[in-house]
Image (spheres, rainbow, N blue to C red):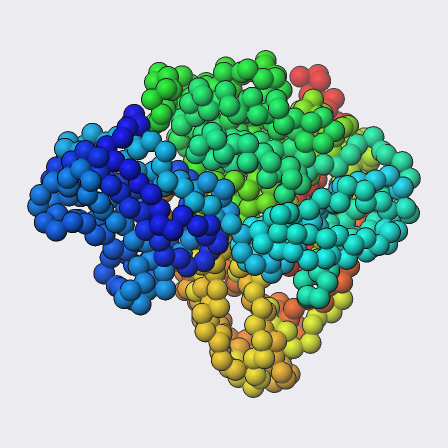
């Protein structure tokens, strides 16, 4: 739609708003051309936001909205999706010079205000469209009003360090003060003390001008070994420890870098530069993919994206990965990420673009098989994932697809990993964010209905930090997935790196090691889907601390979360405190707590989450757990009734009651299966975990025929996870048979 001047719009006040806060403000529309009865205005956002949805009937409730206008003009108002609103004119025309006032979070009736989106954004536009005659012909105002959403007060801190360093050589640290939503704490000022084994103590000063983030360019660790850098805000109880740093006397053949290959997207191409700068300067990832859906990317979007990829690529420091997201429906093969090693490659769509008008309208590639056929033989990598429309992995091209994404802000998808292994595909495992908030490598779900978890990351072993090395490492499958923590993970078979396929004449020996970001609970080694070895890293249990975990998915598709509603009653002991585990969405919360009872609701997908209770005297305690699960059943999300409804909807699933006592738990954990796709409850005393390092060496005496994938699953005590890519071991007999055949 063309921009025009049928009126003007402004925000009052136009001040910065704090992410996740409650606010009250107005949009004032002044007509320069009359709006006839039946016409109106609509206000929408340029981003996939989690702003509160307006309501019109409870003046004392949150999100109360009012609309006012001149005498004689009748106003009808309707909310549109997330954060949008439409106002229709009735009675008489709105004349030139007259105003409409839309009030978000109107507080005169007692409303606390409207909840601001939970993620920072330099330019949050309020796009205003006008229908002058009620004919459905909408035109957009030039220069839509905007405001900035900024981070709130600091409540936590991150120290991001390289995973590998050479003793005595300087490296860069990123220090990020975070608000409650994971944004940089924009107004923070203070001094931070840094220390660590082999590190010269440092004092770092941050001012408000730093925006909650600073870089220490000359950090040096002078001795070899594994170290973690500790940080403390002077005068405050804000503490942090960096990810582990493996310091060596010299560089090895491969360097461990961090990637968010599926960093997500933003709507306006004017915000792509901020997307890349956040990845580089705040999240501290080395490789990032801006994966705009092909069906909405314009030729101008593609031009801007590639221009920025060129400008911001710094070999040895930061590399944007050129590419896009092919956006077929699942019955067409589903969404796939496409990556180029060269620039100026064409975007190939699966269907006519939805918007804007500048995009060619011809359908190009109707199915993922057409996608494979088109790019086969070209310098291209394609990866399947679970996102807007999950990839149908029945369709696979090993020459193009080296790895599959199994964790993101959508959740964790071990069912995808399992399906890959069952089909005998030789694929590595990736983690990404797939975010819409402009925070690649560092995203949190906020109140988004389609997101449940923090973004994942990919550890990648490369020769150097370049686009060429990224492609080589991806094709070699020297990658592993994490739910976000920068664990250092290594796995090999008889000296062959993860991702390699080799032939063995003797029983293979698998070696693995991990340096964690929190105490480790266990390392699990799998041969295919069979757990063949487990390395527990637990030393007894925490006295008087009861842990309840729940996990699983609703279905093998996109948007497959589970809502867990639970109540635990305790007899014979008193509840002193309650902690949560991976309650990453604000929709997950403890809803009630007394000395004898706790209630909760929790939204998750795939990964384990739960609560921990501290009891005063657990010896004679008994526990009565009642729970119900609700599963996602809707076909998707979005749309406003113009076609088949695409909404997230919930359906009641399994309900259960579990009665145990302290004696039962002394014998070990108690589990209850709650449905398919690993839906499960688990009660246990909290394991006592202290080790930050783990290793295993295991020889498979069976040497099964065929190709056996050996891979590692790591679980920290905080239930953050990592998955190594497999090493693929083929028995010599099977290899000989294959060659003869």
Dividing the image into 4 quarters, which one contains the C terminus? top right
The correct choice, above or below, for 398 with respect to 255 in the image is: above
Residue for point 23% across, 61% down: 57
> Is residue 486 visible in this depiction of the protein?
no
Residue for point 68% across, 31% down: 318
Dividing the image into 4 quarters, which one contains the N terminus? top left
The correct choice, above or below, for 599 with respect to 130 in the image is: below
Of residue 413 and residue 311, the one placed in the foreground of this image is 311
Residue 102 in the figure: left or right of residue 95: right
Q: How many numbered dots are placed on residues in this image? A: 0
> Is residue 621 visible in this depiction of the protein?
yes
Residue for point 71% across, 18% down: 739
| Residue 535 quadrant | bottom right
Residue furthest front in the image: 97
Q: Position of residue 615 (x, y in %)?
A: 61, 79
The correct choice, above or below, for 546 with respect to 680 in the image is: below
Of residue 224 and residue 71, the one placed in the foreground of this image is 71
Q: Position of residue 385 (x, y in %)?
A: 52, 35
Q: Position of residue 137 (x, y in %)?
A: 20, 29
Q: Position of residue 198 (x, y in %)?
A: 88, 51
| Residue 170 quadrant | top right
Residue 580 in the figure: left or right of residue 557: right
Residue for point 24% across, 41% down: 30
């Amino acid at each position: 739609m063309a921009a025009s001047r049928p009126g003007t719009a402004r925000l009052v006040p136009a001040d910065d708003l704090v992410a996740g806060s409650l606010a009250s403000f107005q949009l004032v529309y002044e007509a320069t051309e009359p709006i006839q009865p039946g016409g109106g205005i609509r206000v929408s956002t340029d981003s996939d936001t989690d702003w509160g949805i307006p309501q019109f009937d409870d003046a004392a409730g949150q999100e109360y909205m009012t609309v006012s206008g001149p005498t004689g003009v009748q106003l009808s108002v309707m909310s549109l999706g997330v954060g949008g609103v439409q106002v229709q004119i009735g009675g008489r025309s709105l004349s030139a010079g007259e105003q409409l006032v839309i009030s978000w979070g109107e507080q005169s009736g007692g409303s606390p205000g409207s909840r601001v989106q939970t993620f920072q954004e330099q330019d949050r536009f309020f796009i205003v469209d006008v229908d002058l005659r009620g004919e459905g012909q909408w035109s957009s105002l030039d220069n839509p009003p905007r405001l900035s959403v900024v981070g709130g007060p600091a409540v936590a801190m991150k120290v991001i360090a390289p995973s590998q360093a050479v003793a005595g050589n300087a490296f860069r640290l990123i220090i990020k003060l975070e608000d409650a939503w994971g944004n940089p704490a924009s107004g923070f000022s203070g001094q931070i003390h840094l220390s660590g084994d082999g590190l010269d103590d440092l004092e770092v000063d941050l001012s408000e001008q730093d925006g909650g983030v600073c870089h220490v360019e000359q950090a040096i660790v002078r001795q070899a070994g594994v170290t973690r850098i500790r940080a403390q805000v002077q005068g405050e109880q804000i503490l942090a420890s960096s990810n582990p740093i493996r310091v060596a006397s010299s560089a090895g053949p491969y360097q461990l870098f961090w990637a968010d290959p599926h960093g997500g997207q933003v709507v306006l191409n004017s915000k792509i530069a901020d997307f890349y700068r956040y990845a580089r300067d705040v999240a501290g990832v080395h490789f990032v993919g801006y994966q705009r859906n092909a069906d909405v990317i314009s030729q101008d979007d593609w031009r801007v994206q590639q221009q920025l990829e060129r400008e911001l690529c710094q070999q040895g420091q930061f590399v944007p990965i050129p590419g896009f997201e092919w956006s077929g429906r699942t019955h067409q093969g589903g969404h796939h990420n496409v990556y180029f090693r060269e620039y100026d490659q064409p975007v190939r769509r699966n269907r006519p673009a939805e918007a804007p008008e500048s995009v060619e309208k011809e359908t190009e590639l109707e199915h993922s098989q057409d996608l494979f056929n088109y790019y086969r033989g070209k310098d291209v990598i394609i990866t399947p994932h679970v996102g807007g429309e999950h990839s149908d992995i029945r369709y696979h091209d090993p020459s193009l697809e080296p790895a599959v994404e199994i964790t993101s802000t959508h959740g964790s998808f071990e069912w995808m990993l399992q399906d890959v292994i069952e089909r005998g595909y030789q694929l590595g495992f990736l983690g990404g964010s797939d975010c819409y908030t402009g925070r690649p490598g560092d995203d949190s779900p906020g109140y988004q209905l389609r997101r449940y978890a923090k973004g994942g990351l990919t550890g990648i072993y490369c020769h150097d930090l370049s686009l060429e090395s990224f492609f080589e490492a991806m094709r070699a499958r020297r990658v592993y997935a994490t739910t976000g923590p920068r664990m250092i993970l290594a796995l090999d078979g008889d000296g062959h790196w993860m991702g390699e396929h080799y032939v063995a004449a003797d029983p293979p020996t698998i070696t693995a090691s991990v340096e964690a970001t929190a105490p480790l609970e266990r390392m699990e080694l799998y041969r295919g889907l069979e757990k063949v070895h487990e390395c527990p890293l637990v030393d007894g249990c925490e006295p008087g601390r009861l842990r309840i975990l729940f996990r699983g998915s609703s279905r093998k598709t996109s948007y497959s979360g589970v809502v867990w509603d639970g109540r635990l009653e305790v007899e014979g002991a008193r509840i002193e405190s309650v902690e949560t585990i991976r309650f990453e969405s604000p929709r997950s919360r403890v809803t009630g707590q007394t000395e004898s009872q706790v209630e909760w609701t929790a939204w998750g997908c795939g990964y384990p989450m739960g609560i921990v209770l501290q009891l005063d005297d657990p010896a004679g305690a008994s526990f009565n757990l009642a729970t119900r699960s609700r599963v996602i059943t809707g076909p998707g999300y979005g749309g406003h009734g113009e076609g088949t409804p695409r909404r997230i909807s919930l359906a009641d699933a399994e309900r259960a009651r579990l009665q145990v006592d302290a004696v039962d738990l002394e014998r070990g954990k108690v589990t209850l299966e709650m449905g398919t796709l690993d839906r499960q409850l688990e009660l246990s005393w909290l394991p006592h975990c202290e080790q930050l390092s783990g290793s295993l060496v295991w020889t498979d005496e069976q040497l099964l025929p065929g190709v056996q994938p050996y891979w590692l699953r790591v679980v920290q005590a905080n239930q953050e996870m990592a998955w190594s890519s497999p090493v693929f071991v083929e028995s010599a007999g099977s290899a000989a048979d294959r060659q003869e055949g």
